[in-house]
Image: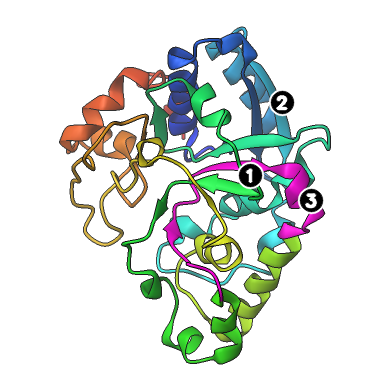
């Protein structure tokens, strides 16, 4: 997971939810990715203290993501939150984590797990680099601009693949296969094209769709009930999708902690509250 000052409350809730529902919490290792903030020289020490005081026995490692890696590669998207450099850290997991780590689950900071995470960990990826719930009914074309669809060289990248939308907030990744296939470079290649040709409007998601859509090991939808933050424009309250639920994901504009603090929560935000360890934390009083 990434640990960002803006999303810290969400990240902590996410970690807590994973531990709460794990059959063997002692077997879980967290790889937490942070950025250096220039005005915060001791930022990572503060974070380390925060994490250890909140979870005294947590097995975790902190990694620094150098935001300069993406500074020149990000083109602005329709929502400023999507342009945070830390959003792009998921592209660099294979570089950030030790080469001994062969598999990771990537989680966004606006989700909670309500099932044993080992079930997700144990899925077979087969020949795939990446596993995630796929949504083949989503209107795939809307993720790219007309400029993309009218260019045969661009659209050729989907040839022979049944490209379906997937949400990059929950991914099981084989890092060894990722390194072998040089997937970071493939993703960066599309970011360079985006910078020149503006082929999409949304942050770090479209490069993942361009590289992986149609080549994903499908995971049960219960592992990413996403969109609970509402849509990106109106922030409307959303309902759960039908079927069983293992993970609730507040993707979209409305984060539960912001709605709770502004006294305008959505009904489902009450499911997030039990994991909100930082409700009254001094950490947030000065930020």
Judge whether 216 appears above or below 31 on screen.
below
Judge by depth and name the residue closer to the eye, 50 or 25. Answer: 25
User: What kind of colouring is applied to the model shown?
Assistant: rainbow
Q: Secondary structure at mark 1?
A: loop
First-in-chain label (3 vs 1): 1
The residue that appears at 53% across and 91% down in the rendered structure is 151
Residue 99 occupies quadrant: top right
Q: Which mark is in front, 3 or 1?
A: 1
Marks 3 and 2 in Cβ contact (< 8 Å): no
Instruction: Pick the quarter of the image with the N terminus.
Output: top right
Q: Is residue 86 left or right of residue 246?
A: right
Rendering coords of residue 52 (x, y %): 62, 13
Secondary structure at badge 2 equals strand
Residue 86 falls inside the magenta stretch? no
Start-end of magenta stretch = 160-183
Give the number of the disc on residue 179: 3
Q: Residue beneath label 2, please?
A: 61
Residue 181 in the magenta stretch? The answer is yes
Along the horizontal axis of the image, is 100 left or right of 274? right
Tags 2 and 1 in contact by the CB under 8 Å rule?
no
- Compute the Cα span from label 3 to label 2: 21 Å
**Camera-side mark, 3 or 2:** 3
Direction from residue 153 to residue 237 in the image, left or right: left
């Amino acid at each position: 997971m990434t640990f960002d000052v803006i999303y810290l409350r969400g990240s902590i809730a996410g970690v807590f939810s994973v531990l709460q529902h794990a059959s063997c919490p002692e077997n879980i290792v967290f790889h937490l990715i942070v950025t250096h903030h220039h005005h915060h020289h001791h930022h990572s020490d503060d974070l380390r203290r925060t994490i250890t005081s909140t979870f005294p026995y947590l097995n975790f490692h902190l990694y620094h993501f150098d935001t300069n890696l993406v500074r020149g590669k990000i083109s602005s998207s329709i929502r400023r939150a999507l342009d945070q450099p830390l959003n792009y850290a998921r592209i660099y997991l294979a570089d950030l984590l030790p080469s001994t780590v062969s598999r990771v689950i990537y989680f966004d900071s606006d989700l909670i797990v309500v099932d044993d995470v080992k079930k997700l960990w144990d899925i077979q990826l087969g020949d795939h680099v990446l596993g995630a719930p796929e949504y083949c009914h989503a209107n795939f074309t809307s993720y790219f601009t007309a400029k993309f669809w009218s260019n045969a060289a661009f659209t050729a990248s989907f040839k022979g693949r049944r490209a379906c939308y997937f949400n990059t907030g929950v991914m099981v990744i084989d890092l060894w296969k990722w390194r072998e296939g040089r997937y970071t470079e493939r993703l960066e290649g599309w970011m360079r094209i985006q910078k020149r040709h503006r082929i999409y409007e949304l942050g770090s998601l479209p490069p993942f769709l361009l590289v992986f859509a149609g080549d994903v090991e499908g995971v049960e939808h219960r592992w990413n009930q996403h969109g609970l933050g509402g849509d990106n424009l109106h922030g409307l309250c959303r309902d759960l999708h039908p079927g069983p639920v293992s993970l609730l994901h507040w993707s979209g504009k409305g984060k539960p902690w912001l709605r709770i603090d502004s006294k305008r929560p959505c009904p489902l935000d009450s499911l997030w509250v039990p994991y909100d360890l930082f409700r009254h934390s001094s950490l947030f009083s000065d930020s």
